[in-house]
Image: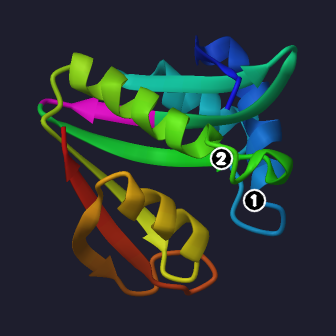
Amino acid sequence: MSAQIVAAGPESAGLLAALHAKAFDGGEIWDADAFETLLAGPGVDAIIAVRGEAPLGFILMRTIADEAEMLTLAVLPSARRSGIGRALVEAGLQASQERGAARAFLEVAVNNQAAIALYRASGWGKAGHRARYYRDGSDALVLSRLL
């Protein structure tokens, strides 16, 4: 992987929005205001993978009581299949566990086979299904993992 994993705060909202737009080209993206609002909330951790000066991706986790939710994971297309996603998932889960989470959840589009494969390889299992969850009408799988 050879990337550095670093914590980010509300000052990184613009960077996270730009990475999100590049990672989800043509998909549902969040703007800087959305990230700033999320990062100002309690129990939220943003973690960025950086190689040199270049950000490659990030994960956004929210922990409430003993449960964590992966809000989003974004990896630039050029950095995919290099271990960046897996490293970010593990760093996000560690941050949530340090906040007291015992279980984590996420939603992923049923047609995002690459992400589903990453999550299954990282120990996530099916916990549910949300019909027409995304703005485009696609369904989501709900996955969970014990920490």
In the image, 29 versus 146, the foreground residue is 146
Assign a secondary structure to mark 1: loop
State the quadrant of the C terminus.
Answer: top left
User: What residue is drawn where x is 54% and y is 64%?
Assistant: 115
Query: Is residue 146 toward the left or the right of residue 104 in the image?
Result: left
Relative image position of residue 117 (x, y in whole percent):
48, 67
User: What residue is drawn where x is 48% and y is 81%?
Assistant: 110
Q: Is residue 96 at least partly visible in the picture?
A: yes
Q: Is 62 within the magenta?
A: yes
Q: Is 22 within the magenta?
A: no
Query: Is residue 145 toward the left or the right of residue 21 in the image?
Result: left
User: What residue is drawn where x is 57% and y is 83%?
Assistant: 111
Near mark 1 (Cα within 10 A), the count class, few <14, some 14-19 or many ≥20, is some
Which quadrant of the structure image shows residue 54?
top right
Relative image position of residue 15 (x, y in whole percent):
79, 27
Residue wearing tag 1: 24
User: What residue is drawn where x is 23% and y is 18%?
Assistant: 99
The numbered disc on residue 121 is none
Question: Do the residues under discs 1 and 2 have CB atoms within 8 angstroms?
Answer: yes
| Position of 69 relative to 133 (above/below) | above
Residue range of the region highlighted in magenta in the rendering: 61-65
Query: Is residue 64 toward the left or the right of residue 87 in the image?
Result: left
| Position of 136 relative to 121 (above/below) | below
Name the amino acid type tagged 1.
Answer: Phe
